[in-house]
Amino acid sequence: MSAPLPLSLTVLDDGTGGLIFLLGDGRSLALHERIAWPDGGLAAWGGQAWQRAASDATGDADGLLRFGSALARAWLPPSVGAVLSRPGAGWLQLQLDQGLSALPWELAAPDGGDAGDMDGGAGDASTGDASTDDASAGDGGVSQGDGGVSQDGG
């Protein structure tokens, strides 16, 4: 089994009420999707929303996981979520329009399971104008530990 290829996901605001998703592995995967902005926009999901979800759990350790699962359902096209949920992938490089960086993307759990490695050391997050940003400009580290694409077909 060959080592999994890192995934690159770019998310752009198309300026007309939609988001464009470009997902690839640099070799055999190229996915392009567009979805409408989710209801409530950034206000419902950005800022302190994840902290409120954790504190609203009243002792329930799954509050953040539920938030991450709902975030993925609202903000990721199903086809992108399906690819990110596949076992056996390496890490995820995430490039965002600057306005989209307010979302806690690292909490997104497309398969409703673990949102991936949260140590911040395995990936690269880049924010700003995704069309001109250097991919290594970010230091955030969005990792997709167990999600992604298996290159051996299994």
Image (cartoon, helix red, strand yellow):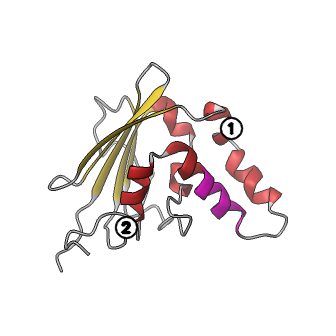
Residue at image location 47% in from the left, 68% down from the top: 117
Res 36 label: none
Image height of 79 relative to 102, above or below: below
Disc 2 marks a residue whose amino acid type is Arg
Quadrant of the rendering where the C terminus is positioned: bottom left
Disc 1 marks a residue whose amino acid type is Ala
Name the chief secondary structure element in magenta. helix
In this rendering, would 1 be left or right of 77?
Answer: left
In this rendering, would 107 be left or right of 136?
Answer: right
Residue 114, position as x, y percentages in the image: 54, 69
Residue at image location 29% in from the left, 64% down from the top: 149
Q: Secondary structure at mark 1?
A: helix
| Segment colored magenta | 62-70
Report which quarter residue 14 is drawn in. Answer: top left
Image height of 154 relative to 90, above or below: below
In this rendering, would 114 be left or right of 82?
Answer: right
Is 132 colored magenta in this rendering? no
Residue 100, position as x, y percentages in the image: 50, 35
**Cα separation between marks 1 and 2:** 28 Å
Q: Residues within 10 Å of mark 2 (few under 14, many from 20)?
A: some
Q: Identify residue for label 1.
A: 44
Find the residue positioned furthest to the right. Answer: 58
Q: Secondary structure at mark 2?
A: loop
* Of 64 and 123, the residue lying toward us: 64
Q: Identify residue for label 2.
A: 86
* Of 112 and 56, the residue lying toward us: 112
The number of numbered badges drawn on the structure is 2
